[in-house]
Amino acid sequence: MHSERELPAGARIALAVALSIALAAAVLALFTKDFSPALGQFFFEPFANRYFFGNYIADSVPLMIAGLGVLIAFRSRNFNLGGEGQIYAGAIAAGMLALSLPERIPPAQAWLFAALAGMVAGGLIGALSGILKALWHVSEMISSFLISAIVLNVGDYLITGPFQDPASNFQTTRQISSQLLLPRILAPSKLDISVFIGLALIAVLAIMSKHTRPGFELRVCGENEEFARYCGIPVALYQSAAMAISGALYGLAGALIVMGPQARVMRGFSSGLGWSAISVALLAQSSEAGILPSALFIAYLKAGSDHVMIGSGVPSEIISILQAAAMFFITARHFPVRKRRRP
């Protein structure tokens, strides 16, 4: 006889991580001629030296912040599929503002203004989907995805048109002054002080979620909408606000990328970051504390696949396969078990 047994959250996470690693080894065995060097490149090179390790941590920072954005949307029973567009909008707003600032402005003010510009741009786009759902019951998944597609196309037009750097052959804006960029740590890697912003946001949102009234009411709205209305909680307001905060965090992630070593807005720079953030939030299992290890794990898969691509010629699409496998096992709540017949 066969039946289903529910997997605890911790078991799903451990299973997803273990099977993703096993799948990575299997893919390397299939697509590389020299299995042992490729295995070392994937699993160990992200920690091989200061430069590789710093770049690996740097890649996890936008995943932390964007992952928090997805988690906030999840908590209100919303699904924000517009992360790519919100990151793009935040990056363009921050980049254009930074380029317009005088070079004599104190760097801290430039960082603050750029971060706020990115958050406002991403937050407005996220809020639009939340308002459409609250007023006319438009699916936030459809609206956020379609709005994101529009924003991406408009952003590409701006980067390759009015904001194009006339002195560059690449599709990019002008470079932001080095004096206004976030200071680096672990040089010569691209890691900068934005890592502390990511860690601080995780701590602040964890405290707000568990120890404040808005955090409690947001959880109630997500867990039981009808009960929340019965208790007098403004459900529509919380749903719209959650999508706005989600978009703002996505926009902040884009702004910090631009104000970091990238120092400009390049066409297509986000490269699936919005979708990777969904993997981070799913792996975190609705826990702010889980965002940090989840972001580090997803960034580790990306870093390993990049090293293998350079060293062994394996296509970079391997990361998509591994993330898809991880998401599949995370979302699988039950697995079949065989029951023994009693004599």
Image (spheres, rainbow, N blue to C red):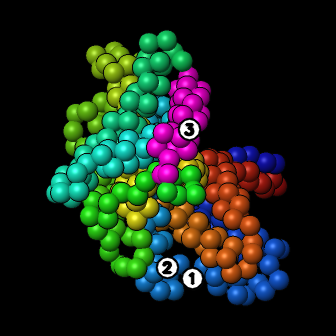
User: Nearer the N terminus, badge 1 or badge 2?
Assistant: 1
Q: Residue furthest top?
A: 136
- Rendered residue at 44%/30% (across/down): 125
Give the label on residue 45, or none.
1
Helix or strand or loop: what does disc 2 sit on? helix
Discs 3/1, front: 3
Question: Label 2 near label 3: C-beta < 8 Å?
Answer: no
Residue at the spot of label 3: 157
Circle 1: is it few (<14), some (14-19), or many (20+) Cα within 10 Å? some
Question: Residue 333: horizontal and vertical position, in percent?
Answer: 62, 47
158 in the magenta segment: yes
In the picture, residue 142 is in which quadrant? top right
Helix or strand or loop: what does disc 1 sit on? helix
User: Looking at the picture, which amino acid does disc 3 mark?
Assistant: Tyr
Give the label on residue 52, or none.
2
Question: Residue 301: horizontal and vertical position, in percent?
Answer: 59, 67
Q: Nearer the viewer, residue 286 or 54?
A: 54
Circle 3: is it few (<14), some (14-19), or many (20+) Cα within 10 Å? some
- Rendered residue at 73%/87% (across/down): 36
Question: Residue 154: horizontal and vertical position, in percent?
Answer: 54, 34
User: Looking at the picture, which amino acid does disc 2 mark?
Assistant: Phe
